[in-house]
Amino acid sequence: MINYVLIILLIVLASPAHADVETGRQLFQEKKCRLCHRVENPGTVFKPICPGLKGVKARHSEEWLARWLKDPARVWKEGGPDVEDINRRFFEYRGRKPGPRESFMATIIGKQVVLTDEEIRHLIDYLKTL
């Protein structure tokens, strides 16, 4: 019985998914994502600047998140339902009439923080836990 428990414990601790989440959490800190995003806030709260990330997996697909993290300026320019949703939530939170606006991540941060495909996978694994 102890052998089975030991084997299961080793499998869980050596699981790449667990390591990816932790690596993603560390990247979130290292890349200073918290300066603009709060993991404890829902996506309807834009405080201090950008939407909260709690529940992000329910709002955006992994494919969309990967494209966004890779090239936010391009994704913002292309538009689509996810960008429209971000804008709608932004204007509702700010109590303003909807209108054109630039995304801080697309115009500023996306040009300064370049992520590898592997880093993006780790970040998405972390974001899925929120």
Image: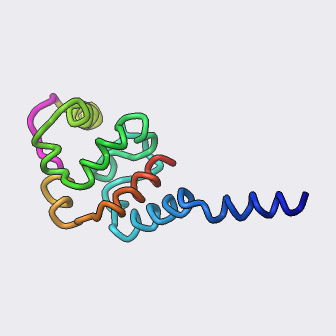
Say if 85 sits above or below 2 in the image.
Answer: above
Find the residue positioned furthest to the right. Answer: 1
Task: Tell me if 43 is positioned left or right of 102 in this view.
Answer: right
User: Residue 52 or 77: which is nearer the viewer?
Assistant: 77
Percent of width and height locating residue 15: 60, 60
Does residue 73 appear to the left or right of 49 in the view shown? left
Residue furthest to the bottom in view is: 30
Residue 104 visible, this orientation = no
Residue 94 percent location from the top left of the image? 25, 37
**Is residue 37 or residue 28 the one in the foreground?**
28
102 falls in the magenta region? yes
Q: Is residue 69 magenta?
A: no
Is residue 61 left or right of 126 when viewed as pictured? left
Q: Residue at x 25, y 48 (%)?
A: 67
Q: Is residue 10 above or below residue 91?
A: below
- Residue at 67% across, 59% down: 12
Q: Residue at x 37, y 60 (%)?
A: 34
As displayed, is residue 95 above or below residue 130? Answer: above
Residue 97 in the image: state x and y as whole percent: 15, 28
x and y percent of residue 35 in the render? 33, 62
Give the extent of the magenta segment. Answer: 97-104
